[in-house]
Amino acid sequence: MRPEFRIDVAAENKEQARKICEKLLVFCRRQPDMGNNYSMSYMIAFWKTHVPNIKDGLVRYRSNMTGVAKKLYIKGKFVLVDC
């Protein structure tokens, strides 16, 4: 799980990258540079600058969430969603 902005990346992965960066910028309380939104150049510059600090945190978070999901699955626990 990391933003990927290369040209040869699939469209759905670029959309995921955009969402990840937006969430990180909101979490960091960065001000949008285009009205209420962040431009792609702003998000890419942010990611390039802060990737060493952020990437490890994202990897740890994903690993922890995977571990939690495995434990719940192995124990047979589930959450019933009433629609």
Image (tube, helix red, strand yellow):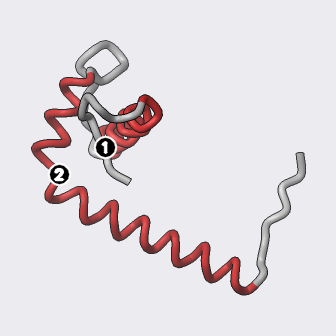
Q: Three-letter amino acid code at disc 1?
A: Pro
Q: Three-letter amino acid code at disc 2?
A: Val
Picture quadrant where residue 83 is located: top right
Residue 18 image position (x, y, % from top left): 36, 33
Residue farthest to the bottom?
Answer: 75
Q: What's the residue at 26%, 24% (across, down)? A: 40
Q: Is residue 27 above or below residue 72?
A: above
Are the residues at dot 2 and dot 1 in contact (C-beta closer than 8 Å)? no
State the SS at label 1: loop
Q: What's the residue at 85%, 62% (across, down)? A: 80
Mark in front: 2 vs 1: 1
Picture quadrant where residue 78 is located: bottom right
- Reading the image, the residue beneath label 2 is 51
Q: Is residue 36 above or below residue 78?
A: above
Residue 13 image position (x, y, % from top left): 41, 38
- Reading the image, the residue beneath label 1 is 3
Q: What's the residue at 38%, 54% (across, down)? A: 1
Residue farthest to the front?
Answer: 8
State the SS at label 2: helix
